[in-house]
Image (cartoon, helix red, strand yellow):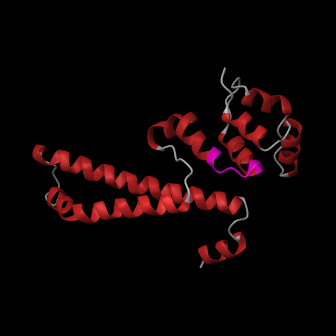
Amino acid sequence: MAETIYKKIRKDHNLTRDEVCDKALASGTPVQPERLERIENGKFPVTPQEVMLLSEIYKEPTLCNHYCSKECPIGEKYVPEIKVKDLTQIVLEMLSSLNSMKKNQERLIEITADGVIEDDEIRDFVYIQKELEKISITVETLQLWVEQMLASDKINIEKYNKIISE
């Protein structure tokens, strides 16, 4: 059996199960080492609350996206898997998608103005829909990047939260 992401990330952080459980207890959410072992070995399904807790302990927001896109039955259908990228790549992908949409803006208006997508419009509509999905995924990638930077103290979280709440 392949190593689960939960075990891999714990090992990457050089933590024992007992240390993770101690951190969980300190946060007010106890987890037994036996339960963590079963989760890590894929013998017991992890709950969303446990994923959130482990994500916070490891400072790995990617765990939440992994769970939603790979393990949650609803998320598997609706949540795309987000790959961690550097900021430059995220921005370039966003600009590329926005430029593409700018070029297709008039065509989208033509297709949707009558509220019906005709057979001869479907190909263009699907192309535009895929471009919009790229923008959505790029926005999610940027959000995940920000969460990762906040978790690793590379962005001042107090200042960030203050500005967000303005």
Vertical placement of residue 155 versus 19, above or below: below
* Total count of labels: 0
Quadrant showing the C terminus: bottom right
Vertical placement of residue 160 versus 92, above or below: below
Tell me what residue is drawn at x 35 percent, y 59 percent. 97
Q: Picture coordinates of residue 156 (x, y %)?
A: 70, 71
Tell me what residue is drawn at x 73 percent, y 30 percent. 39
Quadrant showing the N terminus: top right
Q: Picture coordinates of residue 10 (x, y %)?
A: 77, 40
Q: Quadrant of residue 32?
A: top right
Q: Between residues 81 and 79, which one lies in front from this camera angle?
A: 81
Tell me what residue is drawn at x 32 percent, y 53 percent. 131
Q: Quadrant of residue 50?
A: top right
Q: Picture coordinates of residue 74 (x, y %)?
A: 49, 38
Q: Which residues are magenta?
A: 57-63
Vertical placement of residue 114 versus 127, above or below: below
Which residue lies most toward the bottom here? 166
Tell me what residue is drawn at x 55 percent, y 35 percent. 70
Q: Quadrant of residue 144?
A: bottom right
Q: Between residues 79 and 84, which one lies in front from this camera angle?
A: 84
Q: Picture coordinates of residue 36 (x, y %)?
A: 79, 33
Is 157 within the magenta? no
Residue 91 horizontal side relative to residue 40, left or right: left
Q: Between residues 120 and 142, which one lies in front from this camera angle?
A: 142
Which residue lies most toward the top here? 1
Residue 39 horizontal side relative to residue 132, left or right: right
